[in-house]
Image (cartoon, coloured by chain):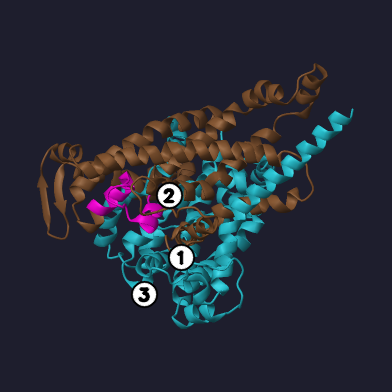
Amino acid sequence: MNLWRATAIAKRGLFWIVLALVMVFVLFPIYWMLTTSFKEPLEYATRTPSWFPHRITLEHYREIWKEGAYRYFINTVLVSVGATLLSLGIAFPAAYGLARFRFPARLDLFFLLWVLLVRMAPPVVLAIPLYTTLQGMGLLNKLTGLVIAYQVYTLPYSIWMLLRFVRDVPIEVEEAAAIDGASKGRTLVSIVLPLVGPGLVATAIFAVIMTWNEFIYALLFLRRPEVFTLPIHISHFITEYEVLWGPLMAIGITSSLPILILSGYVQKHLLRGFAISFK
Amino acid sequence: MRRLRRWSHRHANLLFLLPALILIVFLTVYPLVRVFYLSFYRYNPIRRIERFVGFLNYQRLFSDRFFLTGLKNTFLFSVGATLTEVLLGLGLALLFNVKFRGRKFLLPLVIFPMMFSTMVICAIWRSMYHYDYGIFNYALRSAGLQPVKWLISQDLALWSVVLVDIWQWTPMAFLILLAGLQSIPGELYEAAKVDGATGVRLFRHITLPLLRNHIFLALLLRSIDTFKIFDKVYALTGGGPGTATETISFYIYREGFRYFNMGRASAAAVVMFLAVSVVSFVYIRQVWRGEG
């Protein structure tokens, strides 16, 4: 009996040790970014960096503000909100149509699977023709151009996400509206829209996160500093200055805050949001 | 006019889908056709060259040391990262499948890494990997060990990039597998325990078989995603040292957007698209089955 209790305690202890190690691995880099952003350069650009900041300074945050990082912030907000709204506006009717109607020649199924294939495809594959297309439309180095290019990511994504939310709406509600003589368009706006509201918000949040963090298209299609988004600004920072880590981490923290806050709202949709799963 | 109205009435449903259909064709079907077309041309938009060359781009591609190394590295990266992430994700999911105090608080923290922009993550890891000032080498030196050339050694650089990917994306595998674990009814374990089964045997004969689909899903999604590896290579190593972290995406980027050798880059893009599609099809077939 004693042996049994001893192993139980050992198991319990092992569990907590493993858990602690995991949490250290997960959280240490974030801790390191946070503390570095508050350290003076002498404390990080050295062969003996300090584990805890000895003197906390806000200097780096002031510096990035003075150097106009808010411009990249504004650009990022414009692009990701723009891309998200455009996607939702187009994807919502599409998702509704796909959930409710039959299309000739199984168009609906082919469309859905094509869109899924696109979502899986490497973005760099489409980059060359998109580049020449945007160039032809005069949309290179324009935020509008990036908003359009981002539809490659956000549109397939929004269609699949919304499809699931629309399917959860009981069809009886719509039938009642149809009996009352409402048109399909009206039903969509005044009956279905309020019911999928929360799903729409969740989809929007994921689309914002996706575009907020996007790198490769922003790198290829925006080449002038005045239109840079945050990830591009950060990438220049990383590759051009070897150890200017204080301001770099400060901008890293600032640029991640909106996303971390938003992600709090979608905790319960996380799985749906990141993986189109199958049974 | 009347016929048009009748037609539009009958196909009104199509109107819901039309804007999405047009945009998808414009943004994906057309570019794919175009990239396929360009792969048979010598094409440089800066020097205004566009000349049909047949299969030359493909021939050159497969005798290009950079491309072949890129292919090999992409494969190594994808397999190494995917297997580790799913394995660690499984361990993590088993850990969080236990009800313990503070679980609700720790769970969102574990997901944290995948919320950050890859560039922010690269900034952190590049500072930690730094040979002279990085915290890893400081820790090693403090312990009396040799410092490691994380990102500047031919043999190690690729695996250092893999480690960053593991840190960022294990949470994804974790989420999928945790959902899988929680869908297994507890009675099954109870019943097996009554029959005298314990730890390892429960895991092998109940957990693993029932988790098979979720493990498969995690493997598929992570391998498709890691195959695209670009951002981390761009920000951490720039493809170096030498060709140690050259990948296909990076090759396409360099050929296409630095040398504007877009014909060759298109050929590489076609090869890459076909390679990813093979894996994607497995995934799509599964989803198709689910859609019924």
In the figure, residue A35 lies in which quadrant? bottom right
**Who's brown, chain-wise?**
B
Q: In the rendered structure, which amino acid carries the disc numbered 3?
A: Glu
| Residue B6 image point, x, y percent | 43, 42
Q: In the rendered structure, which amino acid carries the disc numbered 1?
A: Tyr
Circle 2 or circle 1, nearest the eye:
1
**Who's cyan, chain-wise?**
A
Check residue A226 in the rendering and tell me which mark sits there, or answer none.
3
Q: Which residues are magenta?
A: B230-255
Count residues near mark 2 (Cα–Cα under 10 Å), then give few for <14, some for 14-19, many for 20+. Answer: many
Residue under the point 67% across and 36% down: B94
Q: Horizontal placement of A151 versus A95: left or right?
A: left
Q: CA distance from mark 3 to mark 1?
A: 32 Å
Residue under the point 63% across and 63% down: A261
Residue under the point 65% across and 48% down: A21
Q: Which residue is mark 1?
A: B133
Residue B7 seen from this side: no
